[in-house]
Amino acid sequence: MSLYDKSSIALIPSGFKATTGNLGKVYSVLPANGDGDFTHSRGSTATRVNKDGLIESVAIGEARLDYPLTNGLVGDCPHLLLEPSRTNISPDSERMDLWNSLRVTRTINSGVSPDGANTAVKVAMTATTGEHSVYDGVSVSSGTTYTNSIFIKRGTGSSDWQYFQFRYRNGGFGTGGGVVIDIHNGTITYNSGLTDYGIENYGNGWYRVFITQTATTTSSSAGPVLAFNEISNGFDVNIVGNTNADVLLWGSQIEAGSYQTSYIKTSGGQVTRSADVCNNAGTSAQVNNDAGAFFVEIQALEEGSSASRRITLSDESTNNRLLIETDESTGTFKFFIVGGGNVRSIATSTGNTQTDINKLAIGYDGTSAKAYINGTQVGSITNATTRTGIDTIDIADWNGTSNVYFGRVKQVIYFNEALSDSELATLTS
């Protein structure tokens, strides 16, 4: 018998539906009668990567079963993508032909974009010597951190240009930080003044590059610059023109936040994606107050956040709960068990990487509780508290609205019987 056969509630994201308003369902594998299904809400449309590796829009309230991309290849199994509210302030995310430019020409509908449509914009050099670039102007506020991302693909011209600079304009960002992209190899070869930046392979030759920086002044003329670059180890703005060199661009996004989120399309103005909330799975019929195990497989969107993020099994109050928490502190997970309002800490584990895929579990019985991370026991307590009435799983705190977990959820599983130490180690390995 498989260890999973012992479970009474099992969310392994594979099915969903929209219902009414901004509410939808995420189907659980167990129980078969639907008692383990999660309610999902989001007050706007949003995007995901589908099984074909393409970015697609999903309806208001519809859960996003997002397929992971590894080196541009689509994974076999999706995860449930849960994100905070974000606003793309780049007003025309797919129309770089509407941006300002220096010594380039722009042609719309010049290539298949990451959403499968022929909407990529070709940016080509002219023969004039100097900076060859496109740049946008947006308003930013002093002290606010922004993450700027764009999709870029190798050009089709006979002069196969290799290096491009992606940076902030000086307005709002002091001297402006940025990176140099090697589009042949999909790597960052130079960084100027940034601590957070990166590049992701979206397949079919497309890469999404992102840079994060805090605005030093309030400005209405800040924004991204994408320019041809001749060298790999610095910015070069005085380039001899080459009419056979070009690049494809798509999907500009500028959002207030310390990390990039899923693509938000804009056309003529900024667009806000609402936050995802997923909760309210289970009934008392599936839960054993006296002995059981609570397991999650998750991947956080950021390393250390502004608030603790929790996944909770509770009586829908603060009195009786099991909590698995991604803490504000970098690399830290916390595990709690609460009975009759008596809060007991099982473990605080540091030195982890929250943005990795992690498997976490709490096992408990009438006398003890134990916490596991990735196959290793990280803490235990004896004389565990007595619980009553626990019956609901929220990917948030007990009320379903505070300490909401944002990240990628691969599994949420509950076992209504105690598991041995070896079973807990196997489950989280």
Image (tube, helix red, strand yellow):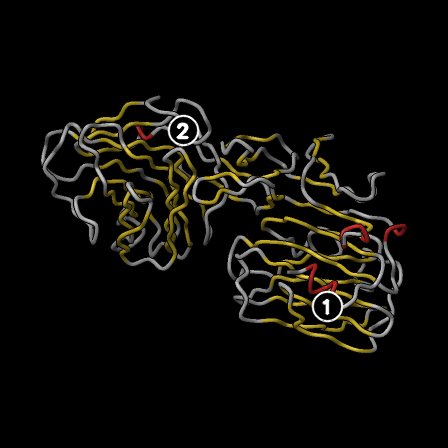
Q: Residue at x 37, y 53 (%)?
A: 197
Mark 1 to mark 2: distance in Å?
A: 46 Å
Circles 1 and 2: CB distance less than 8 Å?
A: no
| Mark 2 element type | loop
> Residue at the spot x=80%, y=52% of the render?
1
Is residue 302 found left or right of 429 in the rendered image?
left
Residue occupied by mark 2: 113
Q: Position of residue 332 (x, y in %)?
A: 58, 67
Determine whether the residue tagged by mark 1 lies in a helix, strand or loop.
Answer: strand
The x and y percentages for residue 422 are: 73, 66
* Badge 2 amino acid: Ser
Using residue 230 as the reference point, say whether residue 337 is left or right of it.
right
Q: Quadrant of residue 313?
A: bottom right
Give percent across and percent down for residue 68. Answer: 53, 43
Q: Residue at x 29, y 59 (%)?
A: 193
Q: Position of residue 207 (x, y in %)?
A: 38, 40
Q: Residues within 10 Å of mark 2 (few under 14, many from 20)?
A: many
The residue under label 1 is which amino acid type?
Answer: Phe
Judge whether 42 appears above or below 349 on screen. Answer: above
Image quadrant containing the C terminus: bottom right
Q: Is residue 245 above or below residue 236?
A: above
Front one among 193 and 26 = 26
> In the picture provided, is 321 more to the left or to the right than 334?
right
- Taking the view exactly as shown, the residue that stands out farthest to the bottom is 382
Numbered mark located on residue 420 in the image? none
